[in-house]
Protein backbone atom coordinates (compact mmCIF):
# COMPACT_ATOMS: atom_id res chain seq x y z
CA UNK A 1 0.00 0.00 0.00
CA UNK A 2 1.38 3.42 -0.96
CA UNK A 3 2.18 5.74 1.90
CA UNK A 4 1.71 9.44 1.16
CA UNK A 5 4.55 11.87 1.75
CA UNK A 6 4.38 13.99 4.86
CA UNK A 7 6.66 16.48 6.55
CA UNK A 8 6.23 14.30 9.62
CA UNK A 9 8.80 12.07 7.92
CA UNK A 10 11.32 14.91 8.00
CA UNK A 11 14.43 14.27 10.08
CA UNK A 12 13.62 17.00 12.59
CA UNK A 13 16.52 15.98 14.86
CA UNK A 14 18.93 16.57 12.00
CA UNK A 15 17.32 19.90 11.18
CA UNK A 16 17.47 20.95 14.84
CA UNK A 17 21.23 20.34 15.00
CA UNK A 18 21.72 22.19 11.71
CA UNK A 19 19.76 25.23 12.90
CA UNK A 20 21.66 25.31 16.19
CA UNK A 21 24.89 25.36 14.22
CA UNK A 22 23.50 28.19 12.08
CA UNK A 23 22.63 30.25 15.17
CA UNK A 24 26.19 29.84 16.45
CA UNK A 25 27.46 30.82 13.01
CA UNK A 26 25.46 34.06 12.95
CA UNK A 27 26.62 34.97 16.46
CA UNK A 28 30.25 34.29 15.60
CA UNK A 29 30.10 36.17 12.29
CA UNK A 30 28.70 39.13 14.23
CA UNK A 31 31.50 38.93 16.79
CA UNK A 32 34.26 38.38 14.22
CA UNK A 33 33.20 41.34 12.07
CA UNK A 34 32.47 43.76 14.90
CA UNK A 35 33.81 47.29 14.24
CA UNK A 36 34.95 46.33 10.72
CA UNK A 37 33.62 47.14 7.28
CA UNK A 38 32.04 43.68 7.29
CA UNK A 39 29.89 44.47 10.34
CA UNK A 40 26.60 43.79 8.54
CA UNK A 41 27.56 40.32 7.35
CA UNK A 42 25.60 38.49 10.07
CA UNK A 43 22.41 39.93 8.55
CA UNK A 44 23.40 38.61 5.14
CA UNK A 45 24.18 35.24 6.70
CA UNK A 46 20.67 35.11 8.16
CA UNK A 47 19.30 35.92 4.71
CA UNK A 48 21.28 33.07 3.13
CA UNK A 49 20.15 30.66 5.85
CA UNK A 50 16.51 31.64 5.30
CA UNK A 51 16.90 31.20 1.53
CA UNK A 52 18.58 27.85 2.13
CA UNK A 53 15.70 26.72 4.34
CA UNK A 54 13.20 27.56 1.60
CA UNK A 55 15.31 25.73 -0.97
CA UNK A 56 15.62 22.72 1.33
CA UNK A 57 11.85 22.36 1.78
CA UNK A 58 11.20 22.84 -1.94
CA UNK A 59 13.85 20.31 -2.97
CA UNK A 60 12.58 17.77 -0.44
CA UNK A 61 9.24 17.62 -2.28
CA UNK A 62 10.73 16.83 -5.71
CA UNK A 63 11.23 13.09 -6.11
CA UNK A 64 14.97 12.46 -6.08
CA UNK A 65 14.56 10.03 -8.98
CA UNK A 66 13.56 13.05 -11.08
CA UNK A 67 16.64 14.87 -9.84
CA UNK A 68 18.75 11.93 -11.00
CA UNK A 69 17.09 12.10 -14.42
CA UNK A 70 17.92 15.81 -14.66
CA UNK A 71 21.51 15.36 -13.41
CA UNK A 72 23.15 15.01 -16.88
CA UNK A 73 21.54 18.26 -18.06
CA UNK A 74 22.53 20.06 -14.86
CA UNK A 75 26.06 18.71 -15.28
CA UNK A 76 26.38 20.14 -18.80
CA UNK A 77 24.84 23.46 -17.71
CA UNK A 78 27.32 23.93 -14.88
CA UNK A 79 30.25 23.02 -17.11
CA UNK A 80 29.22 25.98 -19.27
CA UNK A 81 28.93 28.08 -16.11
CA UNK A 82 32.48 27.17 -15.09
CA UNK A 83 33.72 28.14 -18.55
CA UNK A 84 31.79 31.41 -18.23
CA UNK A 85 33.50 32.10 -14.89
CA UNK A 86 36.85 31.77 -16.62
CA UNK A 87 35.81 34.16 -19.39
CA UNK A 88 33.69 36.82 -17.69
CA UNK A 89 33.88 36.02 -13.98
CA UNK A 90 34.70 38.66 -11.40
CA UNK A 91 38.34 38.68 -10.38
CA UNK A 92 38.93 38.86 -6.61
CA UNK A 93 42.29 38.31 -4.87
CA UNK A 94 43.89 36.95 -8.02
CA UNK A 95 41.20 34.43 -8.95
CA UNK A 96 38.03 34.34 -11.05
CA UNK A 97 35.48 32.36 -9.04
CA UNK A 98 32.28 34.43 -9.06
CA UNK A 99 29.73 35.62 -11.57
CA UNK A 100 28.03 38.85 -10.55
CA UNK A 101 24.26 39.00 -11.06
CA UNK A 102 23.34 42.50 -9.96
CA UNK A 103 24.29 42.83 -6.27
CA UNK A 104 24.54 39.05 -5.86
CA UNK A 105 27.76 37.11 -6.41
CA UNK A 106 27.21 33.55 -7.63
CA UNK A 107 29.92 30.91 -7.22
CA UNK A 108 29.11 28.03 -9.61
CA UNK A 109 31.91 25.81 -8.27
CA UNK A 110 30.04 25.40 -4.96
CA UNK A 111 26.87 24.26 -6.73
CA UNK A 112 28.82 21.82 -8.87
CA UNK A 113 29.35 19.68 -5.75
CA UNK A 114 25.63 18.90 -5.53
CA UNK A 115 25.39 18.25 -9.25
CA UNK A 116 28.37 15.90 -9.08
CA UNK A 117 26.85 14.00 -6.15
CA UNK A 118 23.69 13.39 -8.19
CA UNK A 119 25.58 12.58 -11.41
CA UNK A 120 27.98 10.15 -9.71
CA UNK A 121 25.12 8.49 -7.78
CA UNK A 122 23.16 8.06 -11.03
CA UNK A 123 26.18 6.63 -12.82
CA UNK A 124 27.04 3.99 -10.22
CA UNK A 125 23.41 3.13 -9.49
CA UNK A 126 22.92 2.32 -13.17
CA UNK A 127 25.87 -0.09 -12.95
CA UNK A 128 23.91 -2.05 -10.35
CA UNK A 129 26.58 -2.37 -7.65
CA UNK A 130 28.56 -5.06 -9.52
CA UNK A 131 32.36 -5.19 -9.83
CA UNK A 132 33.63 -2.27 -11.86
CA UNK A 133 35.63 -2.56 -15.06
CA UNK A 134 38.56 -0.25 -15.76
CA UNK A 135 36.56 1.45 -18.51
CA UNK A 136 33.76 2.27 -16.07
CA UNK A 137 36.29 3.60 -13.55
CA UNK A 138 37.90 5.86 -16.14
CA UNK A 139 34.48 7.21 -17.13
CA UNK A 140 33.85 8.14 -13.50
CA UNK A 141 37.24 9.85 -13.32
CA UNK A 142 36.45 11.84 -16.45
CA UNK A 143 33.06 12.86 -15.09
CA UNK A 144 34.62 14.37 -11.97
CA UNK A 145 37.94 15.34 -13.53
CA UNK A 146 36.57 17.81 -16.09
CA UNK A 147 34.97 20.18 -13.54
CA UNK A 148 38.01 19.74 -11.29
CA UNK A 149 40.24 20.98 -14.09
CA UNK A 150 37.95 23.94 -14.81
CA UNK A 151 37.93 24.97 -11.15
CA UNK A 152 41.65 24.50 -10.44
CA UNK A 153 42.55 26.96 -13.22
CA UNK A 154 40.34 29.71 -11.70
CA UNK A 155 42.47 29.14 -9.49
CA UNK A 156 40.53 27.60 -6.59
CA UNK A 157 42.44 24.66 -5.19
CA UNK A 158 40.25 24.32 -2.09
CA UNK A 159 36.96 23.80 -3.94
CA UNK A 160 38.71 21.52 -6.44
CA UNK A 161 39.75 19.20 -3.64
CA UNK A 162 36.16 18.91 -2.36
CA UNK A 163 35.14 17.13 -5.58
CA UNK A 164 37.54 14.23 -4.94
CA UNK A 165 35.60 12.70 -1.99
CA UNK A 166 32.51 12.42 -4.20
CA UNK A 167 34.44 10.26 -6.65
CA UNK A 168 36.08 8.21 -3.89
CA UNK A 169 32.74 7.51 -2.19
CA UNK A 170 31.15 6.57 -5.52
CA UNK A 171 33.97 4.17 -6.41
CA UNK A 172 34.01 2.36 -3.06
CA UNK A 173 30.23 2.10 -2.80
CA UNK A 174 29.93 1.34 -6.50
CA UNK A 175 31.99 -1.86 -6.44
CA UNK A 176 35.70 -1.11 -6.94
CA UNK A 177 38.00 -3.99 -6.00
CA UNK A 178 40.93 -3.79 -3.58
CA UNK A 179 43.40 -4.42 -6.41
CA UNK A 180 41.93 -1.63 -8.53
CA UNK A 181 41.92 0.76 -5.57
CA UNK A 182 45.58 -0.01 -4.81
CA UNK A 183 46.62 0.63 -8.41
CA UNK A 184 44.70 3.92 -8.47
CA UNK A 185 46.28 5.05 -5.21
CA UNK A 186 49.76 4.42 -6.60
CA UNK A 187 48.87 6.29 -9.79
CA UNK A 188 47.44 9.18 -7.77
CA UNK A 189 50.61 9.40 -5.68
CA UNK A 190 52.76 9.43 -8.82
CA UNK A 191 50.53 12.10 -10.36
CA UNK A 192 50.76 14.32 -7.26
CA UNK A 193 54.55 14.06 -7.30
CA UNK A 194 54.58 14.94 -10.99
CA UNK A 195 52.23 17.90 -10.55
CA UNK A 196 54.28 19.21 -7.64
CA UNK A 197 57.54 18.90 -9.57
CA UNK A 198 56.31 20.33 -12.86
CA UNK A 199 55.68 23.86 -11.58
CA UNK A 200 52.99 24.37 -14.24
CA UNK A 201 49.82 23.46 -12.34
CA UNK A 202 50.37 24.88 -8.86
CA UNK A 203 51.47 28.47 -8.50
CA UNK A 204 54.32 29.30 -6.05
CA UNK A 205 51.96 30.86 -3.50
CA UNK A 206 49.76 27.73 -3.59
CA UNK A 207 52.79 25.53 -2.90
CA UNK A 208 53.78 27.79 -0.03
CA UNK A 209 50.30 27.52 1.47
CA UNK A 210 50.35 23.74 1.15
CA UNK A 211 53.65 23.37 3.02
CA UNK A 212 53.63 26.27 5.49
CA UNK A 213 51.64 24.31 8.11
CA UNK A 214 54.61 21.96 8.67
CA UNK A 215 56.72 24.76 10.15
CA UNK A 216 54.93 28.12 10.01
CA UNK A 217 57.76 29.79 11.95
CA UNK A 218 59.97 29.55 8.87
CA UNK A 219 58.00 32.44 7.34
CA UNK A 220 56.02 34.01 10.20
CA UNK A 221 55.07 37.14 8.27
CA UNK A 222 54.40 35.38 4.98
CA UNK A 223 53.05 31.92 4.19
CA UNK A 224 53.12 30.89 7.87
CA UNK A 225 51.24 33.94 9.17
CA UNK A 226 47.72 32.52 8.96
CA UNK A 227 48.59 29.25 10.68
CA UNK A 228 50.55 30.99 13.46
CA UNK A 229 47.73 33.43 14.24
CA UNK A 230 45.18 30.61 14.16
CA UNK A 231 47.19 28.52 16.61
CA UNK A 232 47.62 31.52 18.91
CA UNK A 233 43.86 32.17 18.80
CA UNK A 234 42.92 28.55 19.55
CA UNK A 235 45.49 28.27 22.34
CA UNK A 236 44.57 31.57 23.96
CA UNK A 237 40.97 30.42 24.35
CA UNK A 238 41.92 27.97 27.09
CA UNK A 239 39.19 25.77 28.54
CA UNK A 240 36.24 28.18 28.67
CA UNK A 241 37.31 30.91 26.23
CA UNK A 242 37.63 34.67 26.57
CA UNK A 243 33.97 35.38 25.93
CA UNK A 244 31.99 36.73 22.99
CA UNK A 245 33.53 39.83 21.40
CA UNK A 246 36.57 39.54 23.71
CA UNK A 247 39.04 37.57 21.60
CA UNK A 248 42.39 39.36 21.38
CA UNK A 249 43.38 37.73 18.09
CA UNK A 250 39.91 38.07 16.56
CA UNK A 251 39.02 41.54 17.81
CA UNK A 252 42.59 42.74 17.38
CA UNK A 253 42.45 41.86 13.66
CA UNK A 254 45.44 39.51 13.88
CA UNK A 255 43.42 36.45 12.83
CA UNK A 256 42.88 36.56 9.05
CA UNK A 257 39.32 36.36 7.66
CA UNK A 258 37.89 35.11 10.99
CA UNK A 259 34.34 35.04 9.62
CA UNK A 260 35.07 32.57 6.79
CA UNK A 261 38.04 30.17 6.61
CA UNK A 262 39.16 30.69 10.23
CA UNK A 263 35.79 31.00 11.96
CA UNK A 264 36.52 27.86 13.99
CA UNK A 265 39.66 29.54 15.37
CA UNK A 266 37.66 32.66 16.26
CA UNK A 267 34.97 30.56 17.97
CA UNK A 268 37.60 28.55 19.86
CA UNK A 269 39.27 31.72 21.12
CA UNK A 270 35.99 33.13 22.41
CA UNK A 271 34.44 29.90 23.72
CA UNK A 272 37.48 27.78 24.48
CA UNK A 273 38.04 24.03 24.38
CA UNK A 274 34.52 23.34 25.65
CA UNK A 275 32.95 25.40 22.85
CA UNK A 276 35.15 23.77 20.20
CA UNK A 277 34.22 20.28 21.41
CA UNK A 278 30.54 21.24 21.38
CA UNK A 279 30.81 22.30 17.72
CA UNK A 280 32.59 19.07 16.80
CA UNK A 281 29.93 17.01 18.60
CA UNK A 282 27.24 18.84 16.62
CA UNK A 283 29.00 17.94 13.40
CA UNK A 284 29.36 14.34 14.56
CA UNK A 285 25.64 14.19 15.31
CA UNK A 286 24.78 15.63 11.88
CA UNK A 287 27.01 13.16 10.04
CA UNK A 288 25.64 10.21 12.02
CA UNK A 289 22.05 11.20 11.20
CA UNK A 290 22.98 11.49 7.53
CA UNK A 291 24.55 8.02 7.55
CA UNK A 292 21.47 6.61 9.28
CA UNK A 293 19.30 8.10 6.54
CA UNK A 294 21.54 6.51 3.93
CA UNK A 295 21.14 3.12 5.62
CA UNK A 296 17.34 3.38 5.61
CA UNK A 297 17.03 4.64 2.02
CA UNK A 298 14.57 2.79 -0.19
CA UNK A 299 17.09 2.01 -2.93
CA UNK A 300 20.74 2.15 -3.99
CA UNK A 301 20.54 5.58 -5.70
CA UNK A 302 19.20 7.16 -2.49
CA UNK A 303 22.02 5.64 -0.42
CA UNK A 304 24.64 6.76 -2.94
CA UNK A 305 23.33 10.33 -2.94
CA UNK A 306 23.46 10.71 0.84
CA UNK A 307 26.84 9.01 1.21
CA UNK A 308 28.25 11.30 -1.48
CA UNK A 309 27.06 14.28 0.56
CA UNK A 310 28.51 12.74 3.74
CA UNK A 311 31.87 12.38 1.97
CA UNK A 312 31.91 16.05 0.94
CA UNK A 313 30.86 17.41 4.34
CA UNK A 314 33.25 15.12 6.25
CA UNK A 315 36.13 16.20 4.03
CA UNK A 316 35.33 19.91 4.44
CA UNK A 317 35.00 19.64 8.22
CA UNK A 318 38.19 17.61 8.63
CA UNK A 319 40.28 19.86 6.36
CA UNK A 320 39.01 23.15 7.82
CA UNK A 321 39.42 22.11 11.46
CA UNK A 322 42.76 20.47 10.66
CA UNK A 323 43.88 23.70 8.97
CA UNK A 324 42.91 25.78 12.01
CA UNK A 325 44.91 23.63 14.45
CA UNK A 326 47.93 23.30 12.17
CA UNK A 327 47.44 19.71 10.98
CA UNK A 328 46.43 20.61 7.42
CA UNK A 329 47.56 23.17 4.83
CA UNK A 330 45.60 26.37 4.26
CA UNK A 331 43.36 25.59 1.29
CA UNK A 332 40.47 28.03 1.67
CA UNK A 333 37.84 25.33 2.31
CA UNK A 334 34.93 26.79 4.35
CA UNK A 335 33.50 25.14 7.45
CA UNK A 336 29.97 23.95 6.51
CA UNK A 337 27.15 26.01 8.06
CA UNK A 338 29.63 28.02 10.15
CA UNK A 339 31.69 30.01 7.64
CA UNK A 340 30.08 33.08 6.10
CA UNK A 341 29.17 32.71 2.44
CA UNK A 342 25.98 32.44 0.42
CA UNK A 343 27.04 29.77 -2.07
CA UNK A 344 28.39 27.48 0.66
CA UNK A 345 25.30 27.89 2.86
CA UNK A 346 22.91 27.30 -0.03
CA UNK A 347 24.81 24.19 -1.16
CA UNK A 348 24.64 22.69 2.34
CA UNK A 349 20.92 23.35 2.74
CA UNK A 350 20.11 22.02 -0.73
CA UNK A 351 22.16 18.93 0.13
CA UNK A 352 20.05 18.54 3.27
CA UNK A 353 16.95 18.97 1.12
CA UNK A 354 18.00 16.02 -1.05
CA UNK A 355 18.69 14.00 2.11
CA UNK A 356 15.21 14.76 3.45
CA UNK A 357 13.88 13.87 0.00
CA UNK A 358 15.41 10.39 0.22
CA UNK A 359 14.26 9.95 3.82
CA UNK A 360 10.65 10.95 3.10
CA UNK A 361 10.43 8.31 0.35
CA UNK A 362 11.88 5.39 2.26
CA UNK A 363 8.41 3.87 2.75
CA UNK A 364 6.96 4.85 -0.65
CA UNK A 365 6.54 2.09 -3.20
Image (cartoon, grey):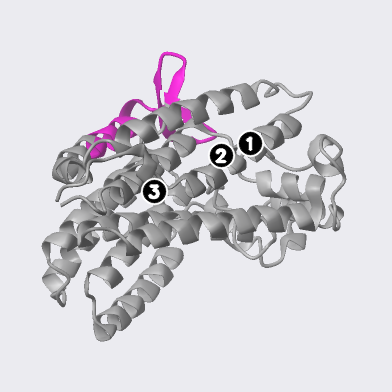
Mark 1 element type: helix
Alpha carbons under labels 2 and 3: distance apart = 32 Å
Coordinates of residue 321 in the picture (x, y in percent): 62, 57
Q: Residue at x 57, y 28 (%)?
A: 45
Q: Please state the horizontal and vertical placement of residue 342, each as a whole percent of the image.
A: 49, 31
Tell which tag, 1 or 3, sits nearer the viewer. Answer: 1
Tell me the crowding category of disc 3: few under 14, some 14 to 19, or many 20 or more residues within 10 angstroms, Cα based: some
| Residue under numbered circle 2 | 19
Which residue corresponds to mark 1?
23
* Position of 38 relative to 23 (above/below): above
Tell me if residue 352 comes above or below residue 320 in the rendering.
Answer: above
- Write down the quadrant of residue 194 in the picture: bottom left
Neighbour tally class for label 2: few under 14, some 14-19, many 20 plus, Cα within 10 Å: some
Find residue 56 and report its horizontal and vertical position in percent: 38, 35
Tell me how far mark 1 sits from mark 2, CA to CA.
Answer: 6 Å
Residue at (12, 65) in percent of width and height: 127
Tell me the mark number nearer the camera, choosing from 2 and 3.
2
Report which residue position mark 3 lands on.
152
Circles 1 and 3: CB atoms closer than 8 Å: no
The magenta region covers: 78-105
Q: Toward the viewer: 261 or 289?
A: 289
Image point (23%, 69%), residue name: 174
Whether residue 280 appears in this view of the structure is: yes
Tell me if I can see residue 224 in this picture.
Answer: no
Q: Nearer the viewer, residue 57 or 185?
A: 57
In magenta stretch: residue 125: no
Rendered position, 290 above or below 250 = below
Q: Give the CA distance from mark 1 to mark 3.
A: 32 Å
Amino acid sequence: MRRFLSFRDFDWSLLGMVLLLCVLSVLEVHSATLHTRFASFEGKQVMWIAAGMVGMFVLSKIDYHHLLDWAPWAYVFFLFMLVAVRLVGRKVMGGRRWIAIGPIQFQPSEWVKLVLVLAVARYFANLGGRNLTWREIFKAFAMVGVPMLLVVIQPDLGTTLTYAPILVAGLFLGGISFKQASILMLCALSLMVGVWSSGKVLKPYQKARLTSFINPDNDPRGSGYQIRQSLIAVGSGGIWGKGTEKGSQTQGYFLPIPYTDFIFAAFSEEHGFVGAIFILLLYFGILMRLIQNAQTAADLPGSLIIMGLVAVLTFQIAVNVGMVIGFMPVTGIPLPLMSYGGSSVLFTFLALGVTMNVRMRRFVN
